[in-house]
Amino acid sequence: MAMYWRKTWPFHMLLLPALILCIVFQYIPLFGVVIAFQDYQPWLGIKGSTWVGLDHFRYLFTYPDGKQVIWNTLIIAAFKVIMNLFIPIVFALLLNEVRKIFFKRVVQTLVYLPHFLSWVILGGIMLDILSTEGGIVNRVLHSFGINSIFFLGNGPWFRFTVILSDVWKEFGFSAIIFLATLIGINPALYEAAEIDGATRWQQVKSISIPLILPIVIVVATLSLGRILDAGFDQILNLYNPLVYSHGDIIDTFVYREGLNNGQFSFGTAVGLFKSLIGFILIVISYRLAYKLANYRIF
Amino acid sequence: MGHYVKFAKLLALSIAIGVLPTLAACSSNNNQEPSGSPASTAESASSGAGTWEQKFDPPVTITTAIVDDGASRGNAFKPGESMEDNMNLRWMKENMGINVKFDFIVTKPEDYDTKLRLLLSSGAKLPDAFRAQGEPLQSLLAANKLMSLDEAIEKYAHPGYKELLKNYGYTLGEVKKDGKIYGLPSFFMGDEGTVMWIRKDWLDNLGLQPPKTLAEFENVLKQFTENDPDKNGKNDTIGLAVPLKEGPWTWMGQTDAIVAALTTQMINTSDIRSFWNKGEDGKLTYGAINPDAKLYLQTMKDWMSKGYMDKEAGIKDPSKSSELVASGKAGIMFGPAWMGDWPLSDATKNDPKADFEPYPLPAGPDGLVGRAEKMLVSGFTVFNKDFKDIEVWFAYFNKMFAKQLEQEGDPFFDPRWKDGYYEGYDYVKYNGKLIKGDYEAAGVPADQWPLKDGRSMDMRFMMTNILGSSVTIPYSNEAPVKKFLADPNAEPVSSKEFDVKQMKKKQIDGQGVRINQGITEGKNYFTGPMTPTMKSKGELLKKLATESYLKIIYGDQPIEYFDEFVKEWLDNGGQKITDEVNAWYAENQ
């Protein structure tokens, strides 16, 4: 053992800088979450601020709008998580069947471009294309004899718009990981299937889908951790008083409540609450994946 | 193997060395002591106190901090100059014995506030003089980090400034603690009061007169909506462009004039600190819950249902809303006089005949006319409690203030700044004539232009430094506006007149309409810091109010819903806030 150490210690030393950086920037700041249980005042610091126990958490749940905000978050985020998993998979499977490499590349590039646009810009664009007076979407609806829809000013339609536009923005980018997995599948499997007389559909069903399933489980498990992230940037840029009842989410609420008024403790408490729920969900889904699919992620 | 081990040893060592400075940087933030402040130790002598000649020897260093978004100020400095090295700083050093040092310069206001909070929580030294507002300001006050200024004002301030502080004392609520003043207000000009902008060419097309009453106003809305005022044969116009995302009161397109034509109450739903109106019993009440607001809501609901107003008003902010008037789809928009340039002049890009003119505000059925007063103060200049040289700060401030005041025989007025600040910067002398702006039109050769592209320079960035914000005397541009209204070609004499002359003609017209209508503007009587319940419940009430107003205007709820809203508002902390506001008012009025 001593011999082993004498020979290999420099390799271990190589880990040290990364380890130190990780501890300094990832773990030490973790102690900052104690301010979630304090009435934190910047000039008093963590040592001087008074302890208030679970007051901030209680505040979130007893706040008149608290339930509505949590409910909105869950609905919007749940739909986003499901759609952002399902649609990229379907898209990746379809694109994988495309024979023309050029066409495939062009489509792939085009669909992941929106990912790089910020919601500040898209917010303005959406206001215009979804306008009830001359917006392109409503004009198309008109030509089918459908009445104008006030997408951004009507609660249920607002949710629909938020979810759909998020999927539109992200599905191309999310599909990359599935496409990469599909490309990595051994062509011999397909060749063998073809010789055995399998149709394309049968090949997809029996080769492609089973082989990307592990990755799907990983992505699904990780995305469950974001179940309380309904998309702060997006909602902040699109919402308005007309749709507060259907569109106000935890993050926008904390933004107005915490940051605008400098309530650090409250903001931290909500952040901690969200992380905790996310953590629990990840653990559960990890267990489920292991039990049902006998698959270990970590 | 041995070879790899040796390589790994070296690599580990070099990485460790490379990382060290990063780690060290994390812990050394507190040790940033200002290196060059000899003035605090060695007593600095000054000559010429109380006049423009005041100079300090040895030079005194004053530290400050500033927001400087490099992108939006293309005409602030000459090439090679910067916030930290420019004409004015060199001048101050040479002629006044003042060294300016920036503790930090950030690009965004949010970053500025964050920086202040960090300084507070780490206990590091604050700049000597700097700007603060809102929550960071209250934190600084609560932490006892700021200097009380009553004595310094009394001893060093320009007499005109003392008077100004007395006249606008009611704006100091946020920086008062135990009866003492802890900050100097950054005043606005106060010239942003609402006027009514209407497409005159549309009025003419339909043979209409500018509306003088609310009834006539409604008729114009109707005609603009239904009778094709732009004569393009399409039913594609509406009357009023209005942003309602933030309720009746905002910075452009606001409907305070409609509110004021119907009631003496002032209404804002998007800020719990305004408007607090004074009742006959001397108590303050929140305007948005006053029963009179129903008159306003009924009117707006009516116009919305008839299609006179932008159907999408509820999801639009002021800039978005102004696109309607710029694109020639709406004929009326309320707002400040400066709208005569942006956004209204954009309308001519679509239609060369488009002609927005400012008009006096319409009167209500009982003859009421009015508008709300824009906030006169935003932010304060505050001083580090340990700052020793406030006399030096005032020497520069008084000079700048005297320059704004331009009073004859003022001992603080610096004759070196008579024509402007610096020749070749904000003015050029050519053929014995003083020229400020439009250098090309005035025939100045290109090599004498302050900037290569011929634009005039925005001196505020250079001059502000330790002052926290540019020096403005409220309402001081009224006389120059009147002068150029009477004779647009008059020669500007004072700097203020030069500034006003720089405005577009439509803007001056707008200012004229505003001044000549002679309205007493509705005041917000609460100017104190956020009360405890405002902090905990303010956002909830703001959301409740704005949402309820829009629901009623859009017809999702009947007008009777207003009473329900008021009850909910009071039950959810509104009553408590009202009590707190009145307790504050009783103490501070």
Image (tube, rainbow, N blue to C red):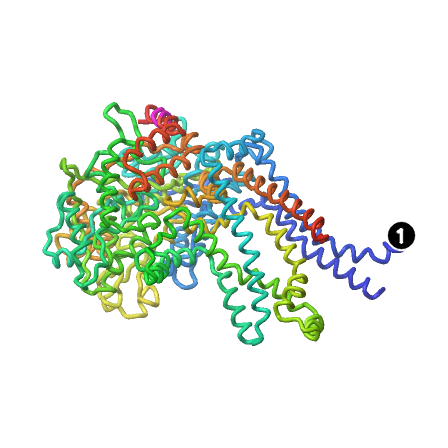
In the image, residue B176 lies at what x, y percent? 38, 31
Residue B107 in the image: state x and y as whole percent.
45, 53
The magenta stretch is: B579-583
Mark 1, chain letter? A
- Residue B39 appears in view: no
Closer to us: B12 or B346:
B346
Q: Position of residue B202 (x, y in %)?
A: 16, 57
Examine the structure image and report whether residue B580 is included in the region drawn in magenta: yes
- Residue B277 lies, with reference to residue B326, above or below; the image says above
B565 on left or right of B483: right
Q: What secondary structure characterizes most of the magenta part? A: helix
Question: Which amino acid type is marked by label 1?
Answer: Ala
Residue A23: within the magenta? no
Does B575 sit left or right of A3 as displayed?
A: left
Give the number of marks. 1
Horizontally, residue A244 falls left or right of residue B410, namely right
Q: Quadrant of residue B297?
A: top left
The residue sitting at 57% across, 39% down in the picture is: A273
Among the 4 quarters of the image, the one containing residue A31: top right
Picture layout, residue A162 above or below residue A35: below
Q: Residue at x 29, y 50 (%)?
A: B311
Q: Is residue A145 visible?
A: yes
Asked if residue A225 is positioned above or below residue A206 in the image, the reply reads above
Residue B524 vs residue B216, the one in the foreground: B216
Q: Does dot 1 land on a helix, a strand or a loop?
A: helix
Residue B430: percent from left, percent from top: 24, 65
The residue carrying mark 1 is A2
